[in-house]
Every structure is written in structure tokens, then in C-alpha cells.
Image: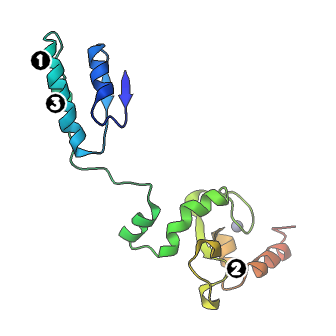
Amino acid sequence: MVLDPFCGCATACVAAERLHRKWVGIDISPDAGDITKLRLSDEVNKAANLFDPLADVIVRKDAPERTDNAEEIAIQRHLPRYQTHKPELFGRQQGKCNGCQYWFHYRNLTVDHITPQSRGGTDHIENLQLLCAACNSTKGKGTQAELISRLKEQGVLK
Ligand SMILES: [Zn+2]
């Protein structure tokens, strides 16, 4: 089985067809489907013994929703702009809460303004961090230093 996830003008698909291999070609370009059909029909004309591969060419015009552009998704879903940095923050913090330092599932971390917006903090990524719900609640409108000191008082941090 040959898989070409970016088949473009179908070179790998045609080569696989010539070798009588099963194949799947995928491309986001609407032209790729037409080009693939054209090239395969050429192959069918050249070698009459091939089964008709054109029957299996599916051209979908309903492109799947992209999930890799956080900023665009946030805008579409009317999320606040600072939320667009959540995936990058999750990577930077390697999945840990920036307060208690415990690991949390992505959805259980919230984007926090290190310097609160009420104290002039901006939405810039350098002013953002991910906190678990408990740390976010402990921090409230306080500063990061105040959060750390409260976590030490509570025995969460040494
Ligand atoms: Zn925490």
C-alpha cells in the first residue's frame, strides 16, 4: 500500500498504479483531483489491462477544518486574543502549571496574565502563563510573586 499524503500531480500514484500496488493519494489542492484523474486516464489508455483506477478517485470539495492555527480558530470562535497563545504556552511549560508545577491535561490549564490586566499587564505572550484552576484562584488579582509566596505558605511549594 502506497500513501502519498501530498500527492500533487499524482506521480507516486501513477508509479504505484504501474506497479499494480494499492495506493492512496491525498492533496488539499482542488486541482490535484483533476490532475490525478487526467494522469490516470492516460495510464488506462496506455495499458488496457489495468483496472479502472478512475472509479476510486474521490474529489472532496469540503476541506476539513484546520486545527493547527490557534489564532485563526480563536478568532472564529470569538475567544479573547490571549487565548491564542495557549498551545505555545503549553509547549513552553511542558504541560505543567506555572504555580504548583504539577502536570495537568491541556484543558485543565487556563491562560493567566502574569501581571494582571487590572495592573496594566498586556496580552503579549511574555506576560502570559498557564495555571491550574487552584493556582489561578489562589493568584486572583495578585502578582506572580504573591502567588508563589501563597503557595509556599500553603506548603504546595517548598
Ligand atoms: Zn497549579
Residue at x 68% of width, y 64% of height: 97
Q: Secondary structure at mark 3?
A: helix
Residue 38: image tag: 3
Please state the horizontal and vertical placement of residue 10, each as a whole percent of the image. 28, 30
Please state the horizontal and vertical placement of residue 64, each as a whole percent of the image. 31, 50
Residue at x 70% of width, y 79% of height: 139
* Amino acid type assigned to the residue bearing label 2 in the image: Lys
- The answer to whether residue 97 is visible is yes
Q: CA distance from mark 2 to mark 3?
A: 62 Å
- In this rendered view, identify the residue nearer to me: 41 or 107: 41
Quadrant of ligand 1: it is bottom right
Please state the horizontal and vertical placement of residue 79, each as a whole percent of the image. 44, 73
Residue found at the very far bottom of the displayed protein: 119
Please state the horizontal and vertical placement of residue 67, each as a whole percent of the image. 42, 55
Residue at x 15% of width, y 18% of height: 44
- The answer to whether residue 52 is visible is no
Ligand 1 within 8 Å of disc 3? The answer is no
* Amino acid type assigned to the residue bearing label 1 in the image: Asn
Q: How many other residues sit within 10 Å of disc 1, few (<14), some (14-19) or many (≥20)?
A: few
Q: Secondary structure at mark 1?
A: helix
Above or below for 140 versus 157: below
Q: CA distance from mark 1 to mark 3?
A: 11 Å
Q: Secondary structure at mark 2?
A: helix
Viewer-nearest of labels 1 and 2? Answer: 1
The residue under label 1 is: 45
- In this rendered view, identify the residue nearer to me: 142 or 13: 13
Ligand 1 within 8 Å of disc 1? The answer is no
Q: Are marks 1 and 3 in contact (CB under 8 Å)?
A: no
Quadrant position of residue 11? top left
The residue under label 2 is: 139
* Amino acid type assigned to the residue bearing label 3 in the image: Leu
